[in-house]
Every structure is written in structure tokens, then in C-alpha cells.
Amino acid sequence: MNHKELIASMAAKMNAPKSVVADLLDTTVKIITEQLVDEKTIGFQSFGNLEVRKKDERLSVHPSTHIRTLIPPKLVVNFKQSNILKDKFKDLPHHE
Amino acid sequence: MNKEKISLQEVVDLVATRASVSKRAAEEFLKVLFTTIEEALLAGDVVKIKNFGTFKLIWNEPRKSVNIQTGEEIIIAGYYKAGFTPDGILKDSVNEPFAHLKPVQLDDVDEHASEVDQTDVAMDPLRIFTEQASEIKSLISEIQALSPTKLVSDNDKSSLLSNAINEDAEDEQIEEDDVEEKELELAKDLELARELELAKELEMVRELERIKELELTKELEQVKALEVAIAIEQAKELELDKEIDRVKELERIKELERSKEIELAKELEQVKELELAIKLEQTREFELSKELAQAKQNSQIKELELERELRAAKELVAKAVEPVIVTKKPDPEFIPVQKTVTITSEQEDTEPIEEKTNPFLTNVKPPKKRKRGLQILVVLLIVLVISFAGFVIFYPPANEMINNTLISTQKGTKEALNTISGWFKTAPQQIPHTVVVPKDLIAEDSVTVSEPIDSLQLLFDTPRVYPEFIATERIVRGSRLTRMAKRYYGTADFWVYIYEANMNKLQNPDNIPAGTLIRIPKVDPRLIDSSNPRCINKARELHDLYVKKD
């Protein structure tokens, strides 16, 4: 489901025009991004937590050339699903 | 790092203020967003949100574990979990503080070279030692080989000399008789020769001794040289050890320097973070002061508006009393103004009905909405004037209405305005079934004037309501919604509208149980215009939506 399809299905559920839904989604994404840039954790009770984690610097060694490289520290976005969501996916059969 | 946590409610507030939407709408939007993502994930789909990231299910393999209490082996079943991969933009903006850092390739190549040098240096003394040892060995062997041969040759010489002397002696004994005189001379000569020979022999012996001494001294020197060489080698080894120690120390110093650099970089980062925090606080304070000022202004404006409204209300009351008198003495400039005021008030009355069903149409952009409302009003006025003319010509009962209005009004403009006001009064009664009525749809009832293209989009976006039905069908084996659509609307693609009207009865559009009563709704003719490709596209879009959803 891509961006367009998501907007279409949401518009159908909310009885609202697509343009409005698209605008709302855009602002939501912007707000979440801003909050994450401020290093705030965003908790959606029924969905999960979005938070920023710091990955420390580390030494990596190239397996074949043995060249050691210092990887600098970085900040990454991490999503942790809530227990409610976890329970919903629990009984899904494995298919692949 | 401040780990402040924000709840859904705060995000809702932010979205509501930013998008100028009511909080209720924003909350509903977010809940629908999460349920939609959830449903898509449950259906095994991936959800991509532009500029944000991708949600998808990740399979965790079943694994063995041990019960801590009993020590029993248990198998944790495999399960799916929702994973999120941030989009490039989100990733970059979050990693802004560390964006300037690049991976550093440590100078591993040089270190490797120095190691090679070290091994060479380490190998050198051994090599030198073996070389020297071989030289020494060869020297010793030479010496050993030389000294016995020389001794042998000396002995030979001495024996030869003695033989020669013996022969001389025999010769003398033979020639004694012949030459007695000569004997003496010879004896003297011999004696002289013997003496000479003896002297020579002595010299030879001395020389031999000297040579031996020399050789001995040479050997001694060589031994000394060997000892010196060994001492040098030991010294070299010591130096090497020292050098290795030094290299190690250098490496340690380098490592220390590196760690210091890293620490410095960390400190710099912390300083930067602090600076950022200070800046943020400053900007926040600034924003707060701005917001305060705005709030004050808003409150003032609201007060002013309230006062104005009060005045307007008073005027309205005053004017409402007046018309009875005014109609007799019509004031051409005054009355239209009054009429428009009443119209707008009625317009406002009709709006709340829409708000209940669809908060977005009214709540999203209020200032634009008013402008559009005015435009629509103007269009409506024109359309209604034309429609009124049509009524006068073709519809006899309309004449009575016109006559009535003619009595009450005297000028042309007034007629139109009055009919509009009359229409607005009757409008809610004419369409009691429909909950939501697009404004241009009402205009469409009387006149089929070519509408601007956007009105079609507006029609697409407004939720469809089916108050009237043109037929009822009973599903038998082999019945298809598409066939019904073809029969009633002309094109099979429009089956979605039949489905929409009967959605409460149908679970799956592809599998309808026989015997179900299907009501065929009356659909706006513009929606099922089979000659318009946009209508077909819209229907197909809806088709995708319903077929995919189920």
C-alpha cells in the first residue's frame, strides 16, 4: 500500500475528500518529524512508540582487506510496537 | 539527551492547530490512520508513507529457550512484528547533529609496512650472526689447514739441509787423498758454509718461530674479534629490544592521542548539543511571546467582533420591524442589503447540518470557505435568475408565485432577490431525505448549464447518499452487480454505486448470497455519465478500493 492508496482508503473510511486527508497526513508527518528532531519520544497507546536512539561510534574491519574504519556515532529513529499491536499480529500464520 | 515523551493527545493538539482543523477531526484522523495501517499490515501488506517511512511485518523465527525456574526447554513460536524503516528525509533530519561526521579509514596500510620493517630489523642480527659465524668457521678452517702444512715444509727443509751436509761430508772423505791441500781450504770453506748454513738454519728456525708467533697472535686477534662481534651482537639485540619497546610506546601514545581526539569530539558534540538546546529555548521563548501577543490580539478582535455582531443584531431587529412599512415606500438601495443579510443568515443556518456529517468540509480552511461561499452565492443568483425566467415561460404554477412576488416587489432586482429568499426558505423542505446536499446540485435541478470542471471533483469528493431508489432486484444464481449497472446506468463500471447503496447488506461484492434484495439507487446523472472518462475513472478507483479492501 503506497502513499496514494493509503490516502484513498482513509478518505473512504472518514467520508472526507482526499485532498483534506492528504493535507492532514502531510502535517502529521511534519509534526512527528519535528518532535523526533527534538529528540522526543512519541507514544501512540494502541500503536507503538517512535523514538530516537543514539548509535555509538564503532570500529569496523573489512573482512577481506582487513582495513579498519571508524564509524562515527549517529542518531536513528526506532519504532517499537505496542503490546496491543503485538497481540493482534500474534496469530498471523507464517506464509512465504 | 532529553527523553521527553509525547502522547497521542499532544500530537492531536499540534495537528489541529497546524492544519486548522478541530481537535475531534484531528483525533479521528489519527485513529483512522493507525487502524488503516494495522489493517493493511494484517492483510500482509506494506504501508509506505511519503517522507516518513515504511511499516511492514517482520517474521521472527521460532527459537528455543529455557524456563529459568524449572530449567525446562521451551520453544518460543515464530511471530510477526511491526517494523518501521524511516525514509531518507526523516533519517537525515534526525541525524542532523552528527551529519558532519564521516567514517574514517584508519591508517592500517602504514602500520602493516612498519611491521614488515620490524621483522626485517629483527631478522638482520640473525643473518649477520650466521654470516659472521660462517666467515669465522672458514677462517678457522683455513688456519687449521695452513699451520700443519707449513710445519711439514719446515721439517722437509731441515731434513734436506742435513742430507746436503751429509753428502758434503762424504765427498770430503773421498777427495781427502787427492787433494789434501784443497781439503783444508775446502774444510775451511765447508766450515764457513756450515757456519753459514747453520746461521741460515738458525734464521729459518727463528723465522718459523716468528711465523708461528704471528699465527698465534693472528688467532688471538681473531678470537678477540669474535668476542667483540658477539658483544656487538648482544648490544645490537639490546638496542633492538629497546627499539621495539620504543615502537610499542609510540603505539600506546598514538592510541592515547586517538582516544583523546574521540573524547574531544564527544565534548564538542556535547557543547554543540548544549548550544542547540539554548537556541531552541530561545526560539521557544520567542514563539511563546509571539503566541501571547497573538492571543491578546485575537481576544481583542473577538471582542470587537462581538460588539459588531451585537450592533448588527440590533440593526436587524430594527430593520425586521421596518419592512412592513418599507414595502410600501420602497427604498431601492436599502432593501437589497437587508435581503442579502437575511440570506446569509439562512445560509449559516443550513451549514451546521453539514458539519455534523462532515466536519472537514467546513473546518479545514474557514477563510477560503467564506470566499467560496460568496462566489457560489453569486453564481447561484445568476443561475436562479435564469431558472426563474425558465419557470415563467414553461411552468404555469410558477406564474402565480411570480405574481405574488410581483405584488410585494416592484423592481427587477428585488424580484430576483425575493425569489432567492423564498427558495432558501423552501429549499430544506424540498430535500428532506438527503443529509448532505452539494450546493451546485441544487442548481442542477432546474438548469443544465455547463458547470466548471471542479464541480465534478467536488461531487466526487462529497460522500454519496442514496435517498431515492429506482428499482429493487432480487439476486438469483448468476446475478451480477455489474450486469445490473449495465442495465440501469448503461455502463458496467458503475456497479460500485449499487454496492455502496447496499453496503449494509453485502459483505463481499464478489459473492452475494442468492435471494438478497438489492435496491438500485437513483444516482446523480453526472456521476454515471458514461461518455465522461473521469466518471469511469472514479468508478474504477472505487472498484479498486472495495475489491482490495475485502
Image: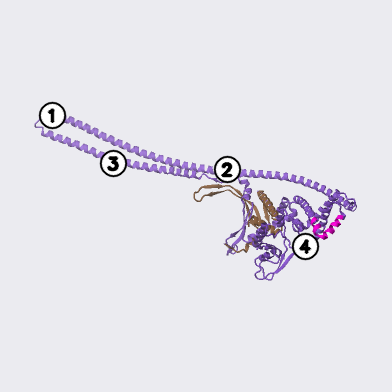
Chain colours: A brown, B purple
**Residue beneath the point at 65% across and 69% down:** B478
Give the vertical position of B77 relative to A57 (above or below): below
Q: CA distance from mark 2 to mark 3?
A: 68 Å
Picture disc at residue B261: 2
Per the model, the C-alpha gap separating discs 1 and 4 is: 181 Å
* Residue denoted by label 4: B433
Nearer the N terminus, badge 1 or badge 3?
Answer: 3
Q: Amino acid at mark 2?
A: Glu
- Chain letter for the residue marked with disc 4 in the picture: B
Q: In the image, what residue type sits under mark 3?
A: Ala
Q: Gap between marks 3 and 4, in whole Å?
A: 135 Å
The 10 Å Cα crowd at callout 3, few under 14, some 14 to 19, many 20 or more, is: few
Q: Secondary structure at mark 4?
A: loop
Q: Chain of mark 3?
A: B
Asked whether, in this view, residue B453 is left or right of residue B394, the answer is left
Element at badge 2? helix
The residue stretch that appears in magenta: B389-406
The lab-note entry on whether marks 1 and 3 share a chain reads: yes
Front-lying residue, B476 or B506: B476
Q: Residues within 10 Å of mark 2 (few under 14, many from 20)?
A: few
| Front label number (2 vs 4) | 4
